[in-house]
Structures are given as C-alpha cells and as structure tokens.
Amino acid sequence: MTELLTAAQMRAIEQAAIDSGDVTGLELMERAGRGVVEAIFEEWPELAKPNRGASPSGSPGYLGPRETRAARRRAVVLCGPGNNGGDGFVVARRLLDKGWDVEVFLFGDPDKLPPDARTNYDVWCSMGAVKKLEVDAVTSGPRPTLLIDAMFGTGLTRAIPLDCALAFHAIEKRDVGDRHPWLVPYHRVAIDTPSGLDTDSGKFLLPEFSGDADDEEDWESYWEWWQNDASMRLLLPDLTISFHRRRLGHVLSDVSRKVVVCDIGLGKEDRHPAHLLWPHSNDVVRLLDFDVPKGRSKRAWPGNDLDKRRGAQSHKYTHGHALILSGQSGKGGAARLAARGALRIGAGLVTVAPTPGALQENAARLDAIMLSPVGDAPTLETVLADERFNALCLGPGLGQERARELVPVALAAERATVLDADALTAFADNPAGLFDMLHENCVLTPHAGEFARLFPDIAEKLNAPATQGPAYSKVDATREAAARAGCVVLFKGPDTVIAAPDGRCSINSAAYERSAPWLASAGTGDVLAGFVTGLLARGFKPIQAAETAAWMHVECALEFGPGLIAEDLSEMLPNVFRKLGV
Ligand SMILES: NC(=O)C1=CN([C@@H]2O[C@H](COP(=O)(O)OP(=O)(O)OC[C@H]3O[C@@H](n4cnc5c(N)ncnc54)[C@H](O)[C@@H]3O)[C@@H](O)[C@H]2O)[C@@H](O)CC1
Ligand SMILES: Nc1ncnc2c1ncn2[C@@H]1O[C@H](COP(=O)(O)OP(=O)(O)O)[C@@H](O)[C@H]1O
Ligand SMILES: [K+]
C-alpha cells in the first residue's frame, strides 16, 4: 500500500528537505523539471528523437515540406505565478536544449514570482521570449506537439482566475476544431496536477457565485458556465507528472488519462521531521495498490492473510460460517450473488436465509450453499443461537420492511455484520436509531445514494460546489461517517473509500491502469457485500475485510474484462487467488 499525501504534507516534506540542508528549493525544481521531460520521453519515446528540419529538395534524412508540420516538435508551456510555473520554465529550457521549438506563456507578474521560479524565469529569458497569457496569443499558430500545463500545482487554493479559464476554453475550442489532427502528434501534460483541480479532494474549484442567489436564471447561467463545461475549468491532460508521491486528488478524480510519479530525491518521508505533522498512522490515507507479489516484498498485501486458510489441520468450521439473510420469493438473486461471493472468497460454510415462501426457489438455485428459512425476528434469534454463524450479511434483496425487523436482532447478536442495500435504506428515516445499534464489528457498504440517505448532512457537504481548497473530500466524508456510525464504512464508487472510526482510511481506486467501468453493472455491489462477509467469516478484522474485498472485487473485474456481469465476479476469484500465489 502506498501512502497518499495532502498538499500540506507534500509542502512539509519539501520544506523539511530544504531545511535539513540536503537540497535547495532550486535543485528540487531542477529535478522536477528534468523528471517531467524524462517522463514525457518515456511515455512517448518517439518524441525523444531529435527534431529534423525541412529540405525543399527532399534530401534523404530530411523532411519534405508537407511532412514538416508533422515532425517539427513544438512545445507550448503555460506557466503560472508560483513554483509550478517555475517547473514550467525548467521544462521549457530542457526542451529547447533538445532542439524543440518552445513557446512560453506566463500568467501573472514576473516580479511577483517566488525566488526559485524567478531564477528559472530569468534563465529562460536569456534563451527565449515569455509572452503574456492571453486568449488570442495562446491559440495563435498551429497546435503544438506538447502542451504543458504548469499553471497551478499544490498551491491552488481557490478557483483559477477567469483569464486562465478563458485561455483553457480557447485552447479546447482550437483543438476540437483542428483540421489536421492525424498529421500532428499532440499530447497534453500537466505538471504535478491538472491546474484547477484541488489536490486534496480531486474536485474542481469553482469561482464563488457572485450573482443574486434568489435569481434562478443568474444561478443557472453560473452553473452552466462553470459546472457543465469542463473546458472552462482545466485542460484535460493525457499525462500528469507528479513528484515524490501521489496526492489524494490524483486518486479521487480521473480527469487525467494517466498519472505518473517522478522521484525528486526526497527519500522516505518518515525519516523527515515533516512526518511529525501526521504522527498517528491513522492520519495517513493509503492507496490499496498491492502488487501481485513477485518476491512478495510488499508488506501487508492481502495474500498474507488469504494464505492463512492453508493450515493443514483446518476444517470447514475453522473458516467460518456466513449467514446471508434473503428476501421473499422472486427477490433472491442479490442474496445468492452475495452468498456465492462469500463462499468463493473462502468462508467455510455459507447459509442463505430466505422467507419460508422463498425456500423452494432458492433450493432450486443453490447447491454448495445451504438454506435455513427465517420468517421473522424470533426465528432469526433462534438461528443465531448457533454460535458457529460468525458473520452476517443483511441487505441485498432483503426488502426494507424485513430489514427493519431483522437488523436489530442481527446486530444484537454481536457477530461480524455487513449491512448493505435495503438494510441501509430501511433506516433513512432514522439513521441515528441504526447508529445506536451498530457495533465495532460492523461494515456498512453504501453507494452514493445510500450514503446520502444515512448521512444527509455529510453528503450535502461533499456534493456542494467547492470554491476553496482543501475542499471537503470523499475521504473526509467517509471518515466522518465512520466516526458517527462507530464502525467501518466502505463508500463505493470508482474511488471506493474505506474508513474506520479511528480515522484509518484507504482508497481502492478503479481508475487509470485499474479502470474497470464495467463494474458499474447491476448486482456487483451484492457480490462485494458477499466478499466482505466471507472474509469476516474467515476472521478478518472489519477494516481488513473491507479493504481486501474491495481490492479483490476490482481484480476480479479486471481479470474478466468488458462484458462482465455480476455473476462472473466470484468465478474470477480462483484466477485472482492463483495470481496472488494463495
Ligand atoms: N516547493 C518546492 O520545493 C517544489 C515545488 N515544486 C512545484 O511547486 C508547486 C507548488 O508551488 P506553489 O506553492 O508556489 O504553488 P503553485 O505554483 O501551485 O501556485 C500557487 C501560486 O498561485 C497563486 N494562486 C493560487 N491560487 C490562485 C488563484 N486562484 N488565482 C490566482 N493566483 C492563485 C498563489 O498565490 C501562488 O503564487 C508544486 O505543485 C510543484 O509543481 C516542484 O518544483 C518541486 C519542488
Ligand atoms: N465506474 C466504476 N468503476 C469501477 N467500479 C465501479 C464503477 N461504478 C460502480 N463501481 C463499483 O460497482 C459496485 C456497484 O455496487 P452498487 O452500486 O451497490 O450496485 P448493485 O446494488 O447493483 O450491486 C460497487 O462496488 C462500486 O464500487
Ligand atoms: K499544473
């Protein structure tokens, strides 16, 4: 797992390195600029070849006039008023040194640049021109090979100024209208972060609404202008090149096609005094990015624990018995999906508990999974007298009325318990009543809709337009929800956030190289609830069960690929286990 950083943590790490005397800010900026150019050439090796000129006579090794536009490498670097702009000047210089044509635009007053950025500005000025960032200037001339966004990085705390937004918009319009896109390779690169994005939350920072709040038309035109038109807010990059470690915002948004991190020699930050800023390991947000182990070198990859079931003396009851509550006849699919997930992920036994009327239907569909009818709360109490049921799952296909009846009994039994779907929605009118019953061995697995039903005030904060950084993020929201509920909350989505009441938090990202949009398909959440339940049955702690299940869920989706339906997920587990060496 990798630690993700906030902007403040990153600044503290840099400052600590500078204060220690090991490195200067200027040297860090040079390393950053060098790293950006290296990362660009690594991503597009063809750009590393030297620029060739045109030969009207068509001599070998030169280009014919018609090819010139395609092969002459030209970069446009947009520099902002801070150190991100400073990185831009370094990149411009290094590309020029490699024979590129480079055009540099600056937003802001050169006299107000911070010292290191100013130094690199001065060096660049001895080599080339700096133009003022204006709409007409920035879009004049042909589309470049590389457009480098060095406008704002971790220092952005409010929405980008209108002039920048207009320039971004004009570039977007120019690019969309380009008549020869096939002739010219064109890549957009963001340094550190796409400018306009808050690096702590992954949200766009929008300008504050300055109109009349009661005038609906006024509000709507503001909203349409900023919210609906992404090109008014940032230049969507093909590649974002960041430094040292990924930031939260890189994972909580996927506006860039790819994010790479380049090492600028800051070493391990836990050796820096800056680490004192977040002394509790629970302050850190981790990215669930376990490697499929080659040398099994990464600590805490899930296989370490998935391996545990291998004990030669073990039998099915040592792997736990999961009970999946189900609903009425005709509504059993979701619980069966969860049950199969629980069994495949390694629970020793799994029992589905439908209404008595739904017994036959389920019997016709289940083999390895057992059945035990539960008509009402007293029956559930009797069933749970069997202490071997050590993990419960309520929600998928349960029905809200039945959920309101059975959830209190299930929670009173104090087993490890997953609440999903109907078991969450059933308490929309009285979330506090649910929170009073929850215990520390519970895991709630809401999607955004269910989350808003249980935590309406938190969802409102999360969904409000962000005008200032650091903006309230999905990480903040999930942590607050877990603290309020007193148990683990797994907030689903392409960026699934998992938090415990003590602040421990991780993100399971299904973006970039782990992108699996085909997971957005009916029933996949039920399978996830089953995975968590199965791992709880195996004795995983709630946070560990939630993290491992979320990670395995995406691995299964990637293993299958497009075309996946919920039924396929659990069937991929054997392949994923095999790859993990379990
Ligand atoms: N500090 C260091 O040692 C290093 C910093 N690096 C770069 O420096 C960046 C951070 O630099 P900074 O902290 O200077 O911040 P940025 O360059 O991200 O931008 C902040 C600047 O823009 C201004 N600003 C912020 N929001 C604005 C808005 N809405 N409208 C107008 N102006 C606004 C701020 O007053 C400040 O001058 C990183 O993202 C990274 O690219 C790298 O060079 C690595 C080393
Ligand atoms: N675009 C996406 N990329 C990756 N995973 C996604 C995406 N959208 C949804 N998911 C995942 O798919 C699952 C959907 O669960 P849920 O919304 O409860 O659906 P259902 O109730 O139909 O099972 C969750 O695990 C969620 O994290
Ligand atoms: K940037």
Image (tube, rainbow, N blue to C red):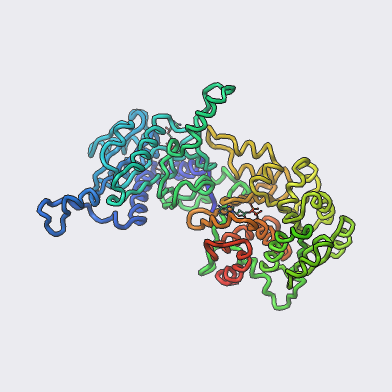
| Residue at (58, 54) in percent of width and height | 520
**Measured from the top left, where is residue 241 in percent x and y?**
41, 49
Instruction: Decide which of 209, 269 is in the foreground and name it.
Output: 209
Q: Relative to 71, is 549 on the left or the right?
A: right
Position of the N terminus by quadrant: bottom right
Instruction: Decide which of 74, 29 is in the foreground and name it.
Output: 74
Position of the C terminus by quadrant: bottom right
Residue 130 seen in render: yes
Residue 561 drawn above or below residue 412: below
**Measured from the top left, where is residue 238 in percent x and y?**
40, 49
| Residue at (37, 43) in percent of width and height | 29
**Measured from the top left, where is residue 375 in percent x and y?**
86, 58
Task: Give ligand 1's quarter of the image.
Answer: top left
Q: Relative to 409, is 320 on the left or the right?
A: left
Residue 504 seen in render: no
The number of numbered badges drawn on the structure is 0
Residue 462 drawn above or below residue 383: above
* Quarter location, residue 546: bottom right
Instruction: Decide which of 20, 30 is in the foreground and name it.
Output: 30
Instruction: Decide which of 1, 455 is in the foreground and name it.
Output: 455
**Measured from the top left, where is residue 310 in percent x and y?**
67, 74
Q: Relative to 402, is 90 on the left or the right?
A: left
Furthest-left residue in this view: 57
